[in-house]
Amino acid sequence: MNRTMWRRRAAAFLYTLVMAVHPLAAQVASDPAAAIAGIDADVDRAMQALHVPGVAVGVIVDGKVILAKGYGVREAGQPALVDADTLFDIGSMTKSFTATAVAAMVDDGKLEWDKPVVDYLPWFRLYDPIATQLITPRDLLTHRSGLPRHDFIRISTYLSREELVHRVRYLEPSATFRQKFQYNNLMYVTAGYLAGFEAGTTWEDLVKQRIFVPVGMTHSNTSAVELQQSDDYAHPHDLKDGKVVTIPVYDYQKFGVGPNGAVNSCVEDMLKYLEFHLSDGNVDGKQVISVAQMKQLHNPSTAATGGEQYALGWFVLYHRGHKILEHGGAIDGFTSDMALLPEEKTGVVVLNNRATALPQDITNDLMDRLLGLKPQDYLEQTLAAQARGQANEAAAKQKFDAARIPTTHPSLELTAYTGAYFHPAYGVIHVERDGDGLVVRFDALDLHLRHYHYDTFAYETNLAQFHLGEGGKVKEMLLPLEPAVKPLVFVKQ
């Protein structure tokens, strides 16, 4: 998931205008440990302000680990402390691992970056037939397929990975192929499936054998089940009614996903991974991935937003004038961030066990300290952004409620709207009576509908519409599961 924030985008845009005229020399503090000496207080302050139970932070400079430390607890209300070996779900930082796995297959001669996917998977289809014929592994990894997120399917519907890749053909694009950057998890699932298929194994095993083992990431894994079997893992959390509570671990494999975000790792292992990238694929004198393919991974392939660019599993941007490669991650109860300063041979990683902006704030803070830049209060900026977001949500909710036409009623009795409904991507779902409303049941979640007006029902600030056929019976239900395209049509069975 794109976790880069607006402040970086503005800085990146300004930087592109002036860099050619006023280049900055690469530099890092002569004593990095001293430069980051005050970071503990900043982490503690952010944890308190953002209600984060546990954090892990790592810094590596010129191949030397400067910081590898845990803060707080693995689970709220429990005494076990976070340390440098505590496992966290790193979310979309996984995308770099998937791109690296594809690079391994390119090294092996089993894939080519710019050869159409259908040459390897003849059955693969997208909604757009032109995109079907042209899309390549590089396109899958650079968010330019034309598809918007369509993320609802990966939290609602249990599928095998192969079946999910089959079903992306039924998901409507919101742009033409290669028209623009649109962050997309499902294309990374496709890329991971493709790499595993060409290797004759699974994405999970490919990442283990071609990355974890040679890089020395002995604690890392790609399984929610395996994560919870560890004796040192962070539990995910959410804030409910002002209290931090533990929530279930998201199980990627149940939904057919994984290459988009399933890596579980710790600061110790992630520092090895960052050094692997800073060393152009070399680990202890062994070239794990060729220099040529590492350059492919790090070189921008497409323009993103706000002056950023996207390489293969990495955003390429500038932090206050210094080039960085960065990617964040976010999944239920976890966020993360990692950044490389390639010219300074420096890497930073921050993990936490609640969905907050803490990882990027602390990453920015550390880069300022290491580069000797005037410090900024990133936490204050985050708190201000949160306040604006809450105000915008309240205004949107007020506008939504005001648009309702009162004193209207459904055309039929509520039981007439119940039954099975079908969409080719989601399969069969069910609508049931729920008191004086309705509930839409997917495999993993329910949408509780309350009457809005006429034959339209609401869940949160979304509208589900029922259409009647010529005989006066319910024909279909329209659900807005992806805001970038028109509502999806589920036909009543």
Image (cartoon, rainbow, N blue to C red):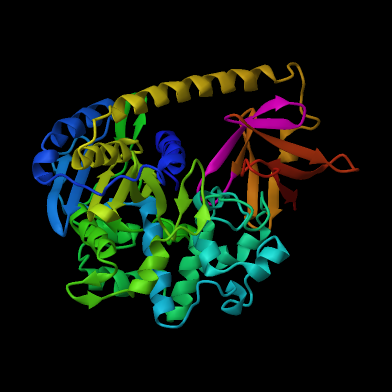
Q: Is residue 470 visible?
A: yes
Magenta span: predominant SS is strand
Left/right placement of residue 285 relative to residue 177 reads left
Residue 463 quadrant: top right
454 drawn magenta: yes
The correct choice, above or below, for 182 with respect to 109 in the image is above
Left/right placement of residue 135 relative to residue 206 reads right
The part of the chain drawn in magenta is: 441-460
352 drawn magenta: no
Residue 216 quadrant: bottom left
Between 342 and 58, the one lying in front of the other is 342
Left/right placement of residue 315 relative to residue 84 reads right
Q: At 69% from the left edge and 43% from the top edge, which residue is drawn?
A: 487
The correct choice, above or below, for 140 with respect to 7 in the image is below
Q: At 33% from the left edge and 58% from the top edge, which residue is drawn?
A: 263
Left/right placement of residue 373 relative to residue 248 reads left
Q: At 65% from the left edge and 41% from the top edge, which residue is drawn?
A: 480
Q: Residue 181 location, x and y as percent?
A: 56, 51
Q: Residue 265 location, x and y as percent?
A: 26, 56
Q: Residue 120 location, x and y as percent?
A: 56, 78
Q: Is residue 75 visible?
A: no
Q: Residue 192 location, x and y as percent?
A: 46, 67
Task: Give the number of callouts.
Answer: 0
For the view shown, which residue lies furthest in the front direction? 21
